[in-house]
Image (tube, rainbow, N blue to C red):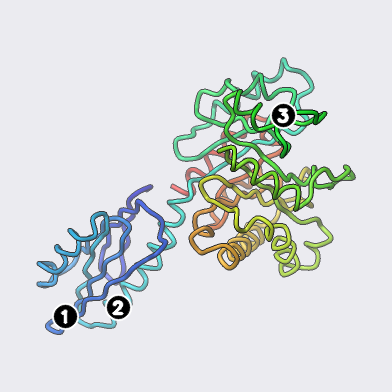
Amino acid sequence: SRGRTRINIFGTVLRLSCCSMALNLKVLFVLASCNRAVAFLVPAGEAVANNRISHLDSVSLRGAQRNQGTSFVGVSASSGCLRGIAAFAVAAAMLASHTARQARKPVVGGNWKCNPDSMSKLDGLVANINACDTSQCDVYFCPSPLHVAYCADKTTNGAKCTPQNCNFTGCGAYTGEMSVEQMKDLGISQVLIGHSERRGEFGIFPMDDNNSLTTKLKYIQDAGMSCVYCIGEPLSIREKGLKDVLAEMHVQLTPIYSLLDPSSVVIAYEPVWAIGTGVTATPEDAQATHKGIRDLIAEHASAEVAEGIRIQYGGSANAANAPDLSAQPDIDGFLVGGASLKPEFKEIVAAISKAKA
C-alpha cells in the first residue's frame, strides 16, 4: 500500500515506509566480524528487519537513526556475509524503484479538444470529471477556449481546469490568443501546450514549434503556473524504430531540458499515429519509449529531474487498456482524448490509482 511496503528476502522481512524519492540514495554498510551481520542506512523512511538481530542493533544503529532524523535503519543478520549483502542489494534496488514510483503521483488529463458542440452538454462532462476519485491521482481537463470560463470553477474534487494553449506575450493586440494573466484571473493555475494538433499534425497549419513552445514554457513558469508539455512522433518516425523515435524526442526536449522542473512540468508523450485512431502502442512499447524519454532527461537534465518528472501516455488510452498501461513503471498517467468525453474517464483514473498505490 502507499507509504508502507513489506518485502520478504531470503527469509528476512523488511517493512519499508517510503516517504521520499529514492534519489541521493545513501548506503552505510556495517560489517561485524562476530556474526557477519550487515546493517544499512538509507534516508527515505523506516525499515526493520524481522530476523535475529545482533548487538549491532544497539548504540551504533540507534545513534545513526537519531542523527539521520527521517532516515531508516535496517539490519539483516544471517549465517553468511554474502547472503546478507545479497539481501540488502535486492532490498535497496526494490526500495529505489518503489520510492521513485511512490513519489510520482499519477496524473490523468482529459483533452476535450473542440468539443462539445453545445454549452448545454458541459455540465454532463464536468460531472464525469467530478466523479473521479482524486485522492491518489491528480486530474485535469482541457475545455475548448470558449468553454474555459464556464468550467473553471465547476469541479468539486480538486481537478484542474487546464486551457489547451496560451500565448507568450501577455494581454494586448494579439487577436485569437489567450494569456496566462487572463487564466490566473479565472483561478486557473495550469495550461497545456505543444499538442500535436497545434504542432501541425493532421493537416492543420503548424501554430507552434519547439522554439515557440520553449518561450511559452518560460512565460508560464515565470507566471507561477504549471504546464503540461506535449511531445510525440508521427507514424513515419515510429516505423523506423525506437532509436529514431527517441532521437526525435531528444530534438523536441533539447530546448527545454534546463526548464524541466517536476513541480511545475508534466510531460505528455503522444504517439501521434495513435491519437484518435483507436490504435495504441502495446504496454511494452509504451514503456520502452517512456523509459527512453526518462533516460534522455537523466542524461541531459539530471537524474533527480528524471526520477521526479511525471510522463503521461497520450495514445488512445481508454478504460480497457488503462490497467495494462498503468502497470508499466515509467508510465505515470494518461492524456485522454475521446474517452474523456465519456463516463469511463473515472475508470481510467481508478486504474492508474490502483496500479500505483
Vertically, is 69 above or below 79? above
SS state under label 3: loop
Residue corresponding to mark 2: 85
SS state under label 2: helix
> Residue 293 at x, y = what percent?
63, 61
Residue corresponding to mark 3: 171
> Residue 124 at x, y = what percent?
65, 20
Amino acid at the residue labelled 2: Ile
Vertically, is 87 above or below 316? below
Amino acid at the residue labelled 3: Cys
Q: Is residue 3 left or right of residue 109?
A: left
Residue corresponding to mark 1: 32
Between 351 and 218, the one lying in front of the other is: 218
Q: Any mark on residue 160, and which?
A: none
Image quadrant in which you'd find residue 119: top right
Identify the residue at horizontal 22%, vertical 83% (top origin).
80
Do residues under tags 1 and 3 come within 8 Å of each other at their CB atoms?
A: no
SS state under label 1: loop
Q: Is residue 2 left or right of residue 160?
A: left
Give the spatial CA distance, label 1 vs label 3: 68 Å
